[in-house]
Amino acid sequence: MEISQRPLRICLLLTACILSVSAFSHGDTDKPLYVSESGTDNGDCIIERAPCATIGYALSRAGKGSQLRVMEGYFEIEDAEDVFHLVSGVVDVSGGFRAGNKSQIAARGVSQLSGVPYQYREALKARGFSVLSDSKGSGNAKASRTDELLGIHQKLKSSIAATPCVGGNAAGLPCTDVDLLSHVGFVDISVTPNSGNDVWGFVDLNTRREYAIAGFNLGTGIFDVTDAENPLEVGFIDGQNAVWRDIKVYQFFDAVEERWKAYAYITTDGSTDGIFIIDLTDLPHSISRVNYPSDITRAHNIYATNTDFSTGLSLTSDLPSLVIAGSSFGIGNYRTYGLTNPESPSLINGGAGIGYMHDAASMLITDSRKDTQCVNGGANCQLLLDFNENSFEIWDATNAASPVRLSNTPYPNASYVHSGWWSEDKQFVFVHDETDERDFQLPTTLRTFSVADLTSPVLAGTWSGSTNAIDHNGFVRGNRYYMSNYSRGLTVLDITDPTNAVEVGRLDTYPASDGTLFVGAWGAYPFFHSGNIAISDIDSGFYMAADRTRDVVEGKLEFTSRSFTADEGQQLSLSVQRGVGSTGAVSVDYEILNATTADDDHTISSGALTWANGDSASKFITIDATNDGISEGLEHMLVRLTNPTGGATLGNLNTTSAYISDPGATSEINFTSSGAAVAERGFATVVAVLKRSGSAVGAASVDIGMVSNATSGADFLGGNATTINWADGDGDPKTIVLSLIDDGIVEGEETIGMSLDNPVNTTIGPLRNFTATILDGSGANSIPVAIAGASQSVSAGANVTLDGNQSNDPNNDTLTFAWSQTSGPNVSLNNANSAIATFLAPSLTSDSMLQFQLTVADPGGLSASASTTVTVARTVVPPVSGGGGGGTLSLYWLVAMAAIGIRRSNGRIMT
């Protein structure tokens, strides 16, 4: 019998594809890069026998998370900036390699470096390098440049106070019409990380306070940025050390508890944290990790469809979905999870793509395209934008369980299709390519595609920057595009004409250079109701900024008040002003986002306002509040301005609250809780929240009485207001903020009691008292120590104990415990919130390793995590005669049969 060679080759190729299907690379990291004295600076440095010659060249070819392996020998650092890339942690650099030697650093040779400041000697020694102090070979110019860069990097490790952009500079950061509001450096973050990654944010509707959620290599920090010039770290949830973290938020109203709840969903790449959930419900004072057994070990990105980017609210009556991109499942095709239980996202069967997804965005279509171009469109069409390295795809994901791909769009000079966002008129998509600047020697390049035809997007414009800095991510607010531009920091584009974007502002968070390297600004979040912008920087931490590019002659459009109200059966009238200028005809759209209202509580959901040239008069949005005859309490909706035209911009107040009360209802004021216990170290802030319910018609006020055994000025600051006022139409919550002082004295608990008195045009409800308890603090709070115990090997059916009792706190604080499973076949944990948890080892067909993480937290909001593993031996089943094996061999045989297309003819296998 003969076998045709061609089909055999096809079979072998298919078999190889199956073997490699889980070994894909998401493109940021790829294979290790090699450097040797005998190498040549050419190509990608990924072949050990054909290495590069210099560290600088290899760094220019590296991506985030790349491994750079330097052979033993002598290497000169030619570019002073490369020194800082060696120690940043974004590229995993190790020295002392010998060809073919894969042992640990301690067993290797030594790579000698010159041109490196002595301050980095110890850090580089741990990586297998020996730093030579003799700098006779370095010129004065290079030494001066090195000293300058060292000063810049050292300065940016610490925090910087608010500084306006004047003369192109804000506290040493190059800028154009973007002010620095604050900078939180690594040394001022509780766990002292050494690199940053993504940033997201949200407005807590319980308090209207704003929070930035920033990722770092050691975990995720939550910062109260309501006062953007003085950010406060509320808490930090540890995670495995990883270069990547991505974050999204979902917030919803719990009608039973009559309050808002919110969760942050986080993924990491390069670790086994899986889908990581942070419970934000206990803000403003604390956060916690949810015990969720993720069914994936890692993912490159996460996205929440059908959500408002400012609050995390659902845009429609449908629940949002989580889209996981580049996961450990399969080849990294996207997976969709439902949020019926926000603490336990559940996989939606069928909700998956067909290839690797790197990043995602979604766009809600309500125009005629939902009927003519979407497949599953109804009242709307939920589009999923899929950025997958080679092209960007548009999916109709209206039915999350049965997505349909509408288009697949490549483009010239595509190198690594990374991410993108859409214009507020929903006619254009902006696409980022992460390596085209490096691979094609392009300036910073942003491509704009028309999606008027969702089935056939067309390249409509290209913006080219003034440097070769890499573009990473971008987001749209009004006619401004906020782009994290790596080494150039934040870049702001005017996209009044999306096909012809114009740079109008920037804040350079990496002033050392504008080179084509993965350094500087990772993310930007421009969706706070305050109009402020959060920026995350790989090398220096977290920033808050204010955009002044929006002060234009065409005018700045915004609401005149943060809150409006009417009774059912009456008409809401929301005023919008045109400030700064009035040149040209302009317009702005508006849309309603239901919070506790529903569509049948009001008569319109969207519309537009227009101004003629020279017209600066306020315009009004009128909304009829439906009288449904049902007693519902004070209902709440958000109204936001979007898609300004004619060159006008959105002001800070582009979102307002509108409240609807039952006819004849009266106002009532309460605290939202009876008190809070807060340590005088760490977050060290008490936020007492007052809520107005019933009706927001008419002005109202209450006096605040205070009784305390703590001393104002010595134990706390703030709380000086004696009267809290609400204007007519104002239904928003108010807060009293106390800043606690760590006096360093060992003392008992102290209390500050507040009470509501003397109501005017309102009544006081049952929660009229609030007690702030100050927990003692003897100096700065220290991070607790998590100890998860030694790894174990057990048999099926064994009762397994996970023991975290050795965990401890340097301040002798009482710790809370949370065990969670991070990988392996799922098991049910007993007493997961205790020091000791148990589970029953499952019966398995192969030896399997289960990984568990213990997170301990102290009352001050600091936490630490540790992991342990349990290997469960397979269950041995006696062989049964008469049966045939299947398994992998059968799979490959089936592949061979399908590939060859067998038919028998005269004893010969043919195709």
Image (tube, rainbow, N blue to C red):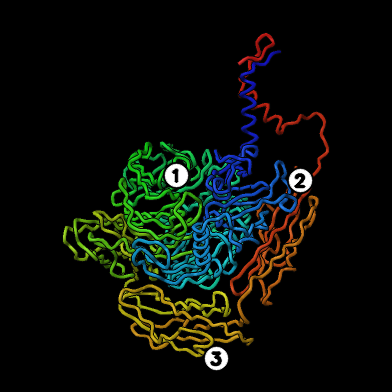
The mark tally for this picture is 3
Side (left or right) of 465 relative to 83: left
Label 1: element kind: helix
Q: Which residue is mark 2?
A: 847
* Circle 3/circle 2 CB separation < 8 Å: no
- Residue 606's place in the image compared with 700, above or below, is above
Side (left or right) of 754 relative to 502: right
* Circle 2/circle 1 CB separation < 8 Å: no
Q: Residue at x 53, y 83 (%)?
A: 771
Closer to the chain start, of discs 3 and 1, is 1
- Residue 707's place in the image compared with 805, above or below, is below
Rendered location of residue 183, percent (x, y)? 47, 67
Q: Residue at x 44, y 81 (%)?
A: 765
User: How many angstroms separate mark 2 from mark 1 (CA)?
Assistant: 46 Å
Tag 3: residue type?
Asn
Side (left or right) of 395 relative to 679: left
Between residue 437 and residue 140, name the one nearer to us: 140
Task: Give the class, few, some or many, for how many residues have Cα within 10 Å of label 2's Cα (few <14, many ≥20).
Answer: some
Between residue 147 and residue 25, name the one nearer to us: 147
Tag 2: residue type?
Asp
Mark 2 or mark 1, whichever is nearer to me:
1
Closer to the chain start, of discs 3 and 2, is 3
Quadrant position of residue 172: bottom left
Between residue 193 and residue 813, name the one nearer to us: 193
Task: Give the class, few, some or many, for how many residues have Cα within 10 Å of label 3's Cα (few <14, many ≥20).
Answer: few
Tag 1: residue type?
Glu
Instruction: Give the number of the disc on residue 437.
Output: 1
Q: Which residue is mark 3?
A: 709
Closer to the chain start, of discs 2 and 1, is 1
Label 3: element kind: loop
Rendered location of residue 471, percent (x, y)? 44, 50
Task: Give the class, few, some or many, for how many residues have Cα within 10 Å of label 1's Cα (few <14, many ≥20).
Answer: many
